[in-house]
Image (spheres, helix red, strand yellow):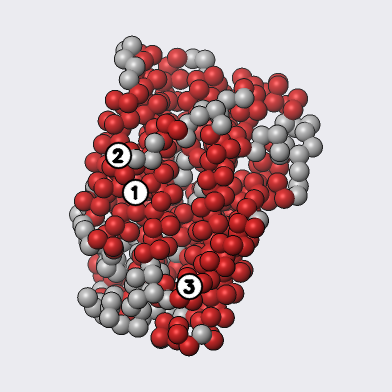
Amino acid sequence: MSISNAALASEDSSTARTKALGEESLAPQGTRIMGRGSYFLAWFGGCVSIGTFAMGSSVVGTLNLLQATLAIAIGCFVIGIALAINGAAGYKYGIPFMVQARSAFGFTGTRIPGLVRALPAVVWYGFQSWIGAGALNMVSATLFGFDNLVFYFITFQFLQIGLSVMGFQGIKWLENIGSAFILASLMYMFYATVQRYGDELSASLFTMEGSWGMPFWGATMLFLGIYSTMMLNVSDYSREHKKGTAQSLLTTIYAMSILPCTLFMGLIGYMVSEATGTADPIQVFANAVDNTPLLMTTLLFIAFAQVTTNVLNNVVPPTYVLMDIFKIKFPVATVIVGLLAFATFPWKLVQPGSAAGLQLFVQTYSAFLGPIFAILVVDYYIIRRRTLDISKLYDPTGPYQGVNKAALVATAVGILAALSFSAVSWYASLIPAGLTYYLLMKHWPACQRFTR
């Protein structure tokens, strides 16, 4: 298949058209449906991750409250910069991550970063669906006496699959409408946590010395690592944003949309786990709120937040991977992804020691995603000088056919560096992977055709 650069020329005139529900493809995006406000709210609503709560719980005993707050803030601003940098190609050309990666990894080689990105998404999808189902089950058991977590998990998952099939048009409205409810609920939960546990928290969290060394920077990477998946495939979203926004403003949109939710969720998890020793989010909020109507509202928020996060963060990336590898339509791919989430056994992740296990999970997959991020950035900004030949990216018989060995070697080098410094794996992988890729692309004859 060949797509010429002329396909992009009509982009600006086509942005006013309405894109049908579920009308997604890997072709250059012609109809962009999100303005600045809508794009901001989409990221805001999509970043209420229960994983953030778990990361807050995991640094209890290591950092004091000030250090935890700064670690979250630093992580969010690094995320904002990284999203703006790696999302530039998708924003400019309207291409998704699986197409963007072809110039660096090759048509066949792109399946590797695609699958590496898809696996954490499916795991988080299952984990967060189980949390959302648990919240609904507690509401049901409290109000109606019906207690069946498996029933709610299956029902909740099929509800999300149905919403996902609608594509970005559905995602846009779901995220935009839900953002106000999410913010209000998070503020209330934070207030309830401080009110209930304030005295005992002040005695430990403010007086604890903590660490400003490696544990602190490791904590910044944990909160960053939750979004290291999205930093890789941000082009899947930036291609939906209407043109006219400078990169500096995009950085601000990303950072400031992610910061409030991440800060509230991380600190709630941190404070309540310190006060109660409980890491299960459902039990934590049940302990923090002693008013039944407010507890029901809080639990419904938890369930709703999992929907907004899953349909944006955990459905789109693996869906595009399936579309690219198996040449199937978007609705079919979303259903497959939803069914795969059942196979992650999420009930095993919600255990008393789950926070530590999820911390290791984030550190490990960040070690694999960091090198790919570095390679994409070096490829777009240094090798291509921010200019892509779109026709070649869609020509499987052109110069990008097969596998670019330079990208594979650089990925391996980055992974080894990251695993050697697992606490800061994402950071540690960037320079080794990026430098190796640049040198190989410049000096390895076997990779010269990928520089065209």
Percent coordinates x, y for residue 444 in the rendering = 51, 85
Number of numbered labels in the structure image: 3
Residue named by callout 1: 315
Q: Does 352 sit above or below residue 370?
A: above
Q: Mark 3 is on which residue type?
A: Ala
Quadrant of res 397:
bottom left
Quadrant containing the N terminus is bottom left
Task: Name the residue at 25% across, 77% down.
Answer: 3
Report the front residue among 428 and 379.
Answer: 428
Q: Which of marks 3 and 1 is nearer the N terminus?
A: 1
Residue under the point 57% across and 42% down? 359
Above/below status of 51 relative to 250? above
Indicate the quadrant where residue 302 lies: top left
Q: In this view, does 57 lie above or below 116?
A: above
Q: Can residue 396 be seen in this snapshot?
A: yes
| Residue 307 on image: x %, y % | 36, 38
Q: Which quarter of the rendering shows the C terminus?
A: bottom left
| Residue that label 3 marks | 407
Please tell me which residue is depicted at 64% across the width and 58% down the height of the picture.
420
| Residue 254 makes an appearance in the image | no
Which residue is identified by label 2? 160
- Asked if the residue at tag 2 contacts the one at tag 1, i.e. Cβ–Cβ closer than 8 Å, the answer is yes
